[in-house]
Image: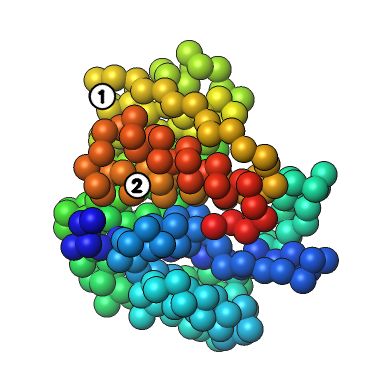
Amino acid sequence: MRTEIRAAAVGFCCADVYENLGKWYPTGNGIDWGIHLRRMGVPMSVVSVVGNDSYGRGMKKVLAEEGMDISHLRTEEGSTCLTRMALKNGTDRVHLESVDGVMEHYALTEEELRFVEQHDLIHTDLFGNALAHLPRWKAAGVKILMDFSVFTKDPAYACEKIFPYVDYVFFSADGISREELEDWVRRIHGMGPVLVTATMGEEGSLCFDGKKMYHYGIVKTDVVNTVGAGDSYIAGFTYGILQGWTIPDCMAKGAELAASVISKFEPY
């Protein structure tokens, strides 16, 4: 285990709240990713913000208990970002309402920017108010992993301006034809990333390294929870990257971890 590698989840975090079930979880793409990797032994930091409410206090408590460095998980006056959730058909989770809270105006300080630069690998996404800093972190030698969800082609996010600063691109490609998807993956790779990986739901995943297009299927399991599959896949894949594994082995670890998550209610 290469314990000298330090990783960080930077930017967005929130609480998923199931009021009718009396349950809630600290989450966000980077948080879920980070918890999985921490449980696999990777040193992990969180650089984000919570409010000074019960959810903020609870998030700090849970993440600290997971062994994550929360020294730069800032607390501000106001409400923690949260998403009110519900279950549909017993397995599908639906988003009812989002409350930005203190996340809306979150801006990293110079000290937090320097702290991020001390890490080998960071995870961020389109919603954590961190995109303006990608060129700086890239220049500092930090490896950058981003989850673009379903927004790679959405003009509102101008992802083609972001791809050159990202080493590991992940996105969801449900509903895109295989031919169109392979063309798009190749095009993204041509903008600078080292690896471009698309998850395709029940059809598995694709990964392109500039030379070969790899395909991996899924690990079949009974589905209890449809949220968290992407984050867990990315975490498993990332673990393989940190270990120096082959791309197929990284994809296999991602599929294995995703299967373990969708077979239970909890997101990690």
Crowding at label 1, few (<14), some or many (≥20) Cα neighbours within 10 Å? some
Write down the residue under mark 1.
210
Quarter of the picture containing the C terminus is: bottom right
Q: Nearer the viewer, residue 210 or 216?
A: 216
* Point 74% across, 45% down: residue: 92
Which residue is found at the position 77% from the left and 56% from the top? 86
Q: Position of residue 114 (x, y in %)?
A: 23, 71
Q: Name which of mark 2 and mark 1 comes first in the sequence.
A: 1
Name the side, left or right, on which 56 lies relative to 75: right
Q: Position of residue 241 (x, y in %)?
A: 28, 44
| Relative to 101, 151 lies left or right | left
Residue 135 place in picture, x, y as percent: 25, 52
Asked if residue 87 lies left or right of residue 121, the reply is: right
Please tell me how many numbered marks the rendered image carries: 2
Picture quadrant of residue 120: bottom left
| Circle 2 residue | 238
Residue type at mark 1 is Gly
* 152 over 128 or under it: above or below: above
Q: Position of residue 172 (x, y in %)?
A: 52, 36
Query: Is 185 positioned to the left or the right of 139 in the image?
Result: right
Is 202 placed above or below 7 here?
above
Quarter occupied by residue 102: bottom right
Label 1's element?
loop
Residue 118: image quadrant is bottom left
Q: Is residue 75 above or below residue 115?
A: below
* Cα distance in 3D space between marks 2 and 1: 18 Å
Q: Residue at x 35, y 69 (%)?
A: 45
